[in-house]
Image (tube, rainbow, N blue to C red):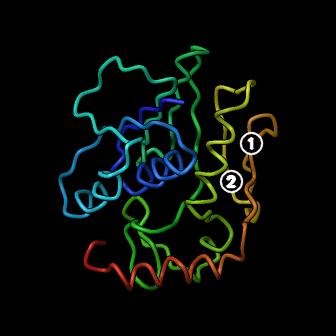
C-alpha cells in the first residue's frame, strides 16, 4: 500500500511512518524540519527505500492519506480507493520523542506526571496505538469517526460502542514508562 503521511517528522507522525515502514508499505512523507529534533527524526527514514520525502502535497499514487493533527488529538485518514474519510480521535498518547522530562509528559502545553491518576487511566503507548491504527485502516467497514480510549479509562462521557475502541496495554504501563524514560535519558539532547 502507498501511504502519504502529513506531519511525518512530528513525534506521532514519526511513529506512524515507522510502523508503516516496518510493515513494508511505501510512504510519502510531508513535513517541516524546523527544529533539530525534526531534522534528527528525518534521518531515521533517509536510508529506507520505502520512504520518499516530498515537500509539496501533490497527486501521487497514494492509496491512503494520513494527516496527524496533534493539537486536535485526531488523525484524518482518507482512503483514496474507497473514497472515504475517517477521523480518529486518539487518547492521551505517550512515547519516545514526545515533549517530556523524566517525570512526565507535556500534552497541548499541559504537564502530566507519569504517577498521576489521569496518566495511569488515560495514557496509551504510541507504538500500541500505531500498530492498532494500521490494522483498523485495512478493514472494509470504517465508521466516519472512531474514538480511541485506554481500556483503563473510567469515564465514558456519552461514548457509543459503535465507534469506540478501547486499547489494552501489551505490557504493564510501568514497563512502558521505563522504556520511554530510558530512551529520554539516552537521547535527551534531541528532546
Residue 159: name its quadrant. Answer: top right
Do tag 1 and tag 2 residues touch (Cβ < 8 Å)? yes
First-in-chain label (1 vs 2): 2
Mark 2: secondary structure: strand
In this rendering, is residue 190 above or below 16? Answer: below
Taking the spot 64% from the left edge, 59% from the top edge, the residue there is 128
Percent of width and height locating residue 71: 40, 48
Q: Image quadrant of residue 143?
A: top right
Q: Identify whether 183 is placed above or below 51.
A: below
140 w.r.t. 22: above or below: above
Q: Where is residue 116 in the image (x, y as percent from the top left)?
A: 59, 79
> Pointer 2: residues within 10 angstroms few (<14), some, or many (20+)?
many
Seen from the viewer's position, the closer of residues 36 and 89 is 36
Residue in the picture at 48% in, 29% down: 2
User: Count the marks: how many?
Assistant: 2
| 167 displayed left or right of 33 | right
Q: Please tell me which residue is depicted at 68% across the width and 41% down the height of the picture.
A: 135
Task: Tell me: residue 2, above or below residue 92.
Answer: above
Q: Mark 1 = which residue?
A: 164
Q: Where is residue 146 in the image (x, y as percent from the top left)?
A: 66, 37
Percent of width and height locating residue 119? 60, 72
Q: Mark 2 points at which residue?
A: 149
Q: Is residue 111 left or right of residue 138?
A: left
Query: Residue placed at 57% from the left, 15% from the top?
Result: 81
Q: Distance between the residues labelled 1 and 2?
A: 8 Å
In the picture provided, is 92 more to the left or to the right than 58? right
Q: Residue furthest right?
A: 161
The numbered mark at residue 185 is none
Give the secondary structure at mark 1. strand
Amino acid at each position: 500500500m502507498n501511504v502519504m503521511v502529513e506531519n511525518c517528522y512530528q513525534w506521532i507522525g514519526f511513529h506512524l511512518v515507522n510502523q508503516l515502514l516496518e510493515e513494508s508499505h511505501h510512504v510519502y512523507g510531508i513535513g517541516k524540519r524546523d527544529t533539530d529534533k525534526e531534522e534528527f527524526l528525518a534521518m531515521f527514514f533517509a536510508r529506507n527505500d520505502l520512504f520518499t520525502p516530498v515537500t509539496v502535497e501533490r497527486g501521487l499514487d497514494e492509496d491512503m492519506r494520513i494527516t496527524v493533527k496533534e493539537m486536535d488529538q485526531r488523525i484524518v485518514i482518507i482512503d483514496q480507493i474507497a473514497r472515504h474519510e475517517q477521523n480518529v480521535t486518539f487518547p492521551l498518547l505517550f512515547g519516545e520523542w514526545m515533549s517530556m522530562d523524566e517525570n512526565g509528559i507535556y500534552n497541548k502545553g499541559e504537564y502530566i506526571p507519569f504517577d498521576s491518576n489521569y496518566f495511569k487511566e488515560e495514557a496509551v503507548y504510541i507504538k500500541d496505538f500505531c500498530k492498532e491504527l494500521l490494522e483498523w485502516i485495512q478493514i472494509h467497514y470504517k465508521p466516519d469517526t472512531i474514538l480511541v480510549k485506554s481500556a483503563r479509562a473510567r469515564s465514558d462521557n456519552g461514548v457509543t460502542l459503535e465507534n469506540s475502541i478501547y486499547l489494552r496495554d501489551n505490557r504493564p504501563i510501568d514497563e512502558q514508562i521505563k522504556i520511554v524514560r530510558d530512551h529520554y535519558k539516552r537521547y535527551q539532547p534531541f528532546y
